[in-house]
Image (cartoon, rainbow, N blue to C red):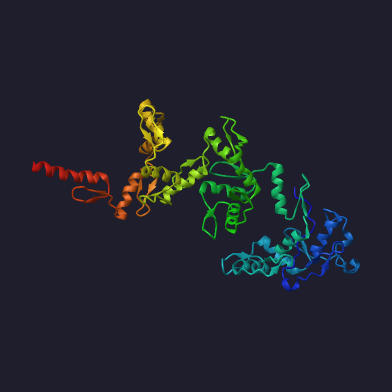
Amino acid sequence: MEGGKLSDPPSDTSSTLKNHKRTHECSECGKSFARQSVLLSHRKVHVGSESSEGLEGEKFFSGKNPEDLRSPPKLRPYKCEECDLCFGQKSSLLIHQKIHTGEKPYQCLECGKNFRQKTHLRNHERIHTGEKPYKCWECGKSFSQNASLWVHEKIHAGIKSYKCFECGKSFTLSSSLRSHEKKHRGEKNEKCLECGKCFTWKSSLVQHQRLHTGERPYECLECEKRFMFSYELQRHQKWHKKELSYKCGESFISPGEFQIHQRIHTGEKPFKCGDCGKCFSRKHNLGSHQRLHTGEKPYRCLECGKCFAQKGALWEHHKIHTGEKPYPCFECGRFYRTLSILRNHIKVHTGEKNYKCLDCGRTFANPFSLRSHSRIHTREKPHKCSECDKCFSQKNTLVIHQRIHTGEKPYKCSDCGKCFAHYSTLYRHTRNHTGERPYKCAECEKTFHCPSQLKIHQKVHSRDKSFQL
């Protein structure tokens, strides 16, 4: 249900900046307005009325005698035969009849869109020209249409003409009231086709869909970093402006972020998982963790259809398709997709192996390698293929195996478009384009693209040695 509308925007679309002088003053607070209609609406703030009732004597209030401004009711002799609506002028009737005939004689030369009235065409053309002749005298903001300025001026006047009858909250725009009323009705008509989640507002759905697509439309002009949401960009820009007021070794933008950071020192973890009892310092970390129990994977790659439980995992996965490897090893010059893979690689150079197998004493650079290795001793193969019942000790080996059944080839060469089932095959293939030949024969120093070619070549030297003997 839409609340009572206090006043309508003026129909005069011909007024320009020159006509907007603050000649209408409120006798209650002394505030001045460029429009008499805005003053009339503003006066209702003092009267405390939420409808036009009770302000009958002030309908034409402008500092003059209202009796002098009243005019007799207008005659409307021109009647529409289709809908019985009446008009005071024949020209108004002719314009109205175009609604029934569908006639739109005025065409925009830029985009070809048609309009019933010439004034509508002129307003539309400002989209292409960028012209904004209607300026707000309060804040200087400009608008392309007079009606848009009138709506904006309500903000300064404190006018909220549309009231929700459920909770009494008032709004400046009728569209804001309609959106608000959906909360009371529990209406969620905007559905995500990817995961089925529903939303009250379309804007919320659009923002949510970026989680699936990975789209980041907001770019920082300082460092070209991109963000998924506008508030993330605004928060990031404060780092460039040095608007950091809360400090604890490092700086924070808001007291909320500072408070969350302090949990590192206090050890406070107020968010508890109801399934396993694990606790977290941040609410979103709990939400991410709970997907391990539910099996929910809301983040889907549009390239290959693979789904992920974590947003960060989807972003990292995208790099497989784009070929992006932003993390370099300064020891050997190789590049890696993720920082965690780079850190594991660096241990090859440092020789760091902190994880030891208790069965054979062998050491490993990371816990994942140790867990995989331990299955050699236990002969555990927990990962089973649903197609052929073959079992594997490692999940990634099962995933690679399943491509035999599905025919999936997720790794695409950015140079020639050829696809591969395994990343290692793609990596070797790219050497055909780059000309890289990293495998060198110790006998004759000849180089090759892959180790198999080197092994075949080395047989030549072994045959030569056997003939010499």
| In-image side of 59 versus 373 (left or right) | right
Q: Is residue 300 visible?
A: no
Identify which residue, 252 or 412, lies in the foreground. Answer: 252
Residue 354 in percent (x, y) is at 41, 36
Work out which residue is located at the far front of the displayed protein and give it.
249
Name the quadrant of the C terminus: top left
Q: Is residue 342 visible?
A: yes
Q: Is residue 371 above or below residue 259?
A: above
Identify which residue, 42 or 440, lies in the foreground. Answer: 440
| In-image side of 169 versus 208 (left or right) | right
Work out which residue is located at the far bottom of the displayed protein and give it.
18
| In-image side of 240 versus 55 (left or right) | left
Residue 453 in percent (x, y) is at 23, 46
Identify which residue, 374 or 100, lies in the foreground. Answer: 374
Work out which residue is located at the far top of the displayed protein and give it.
378
Image quadrant of residue 392?
top left
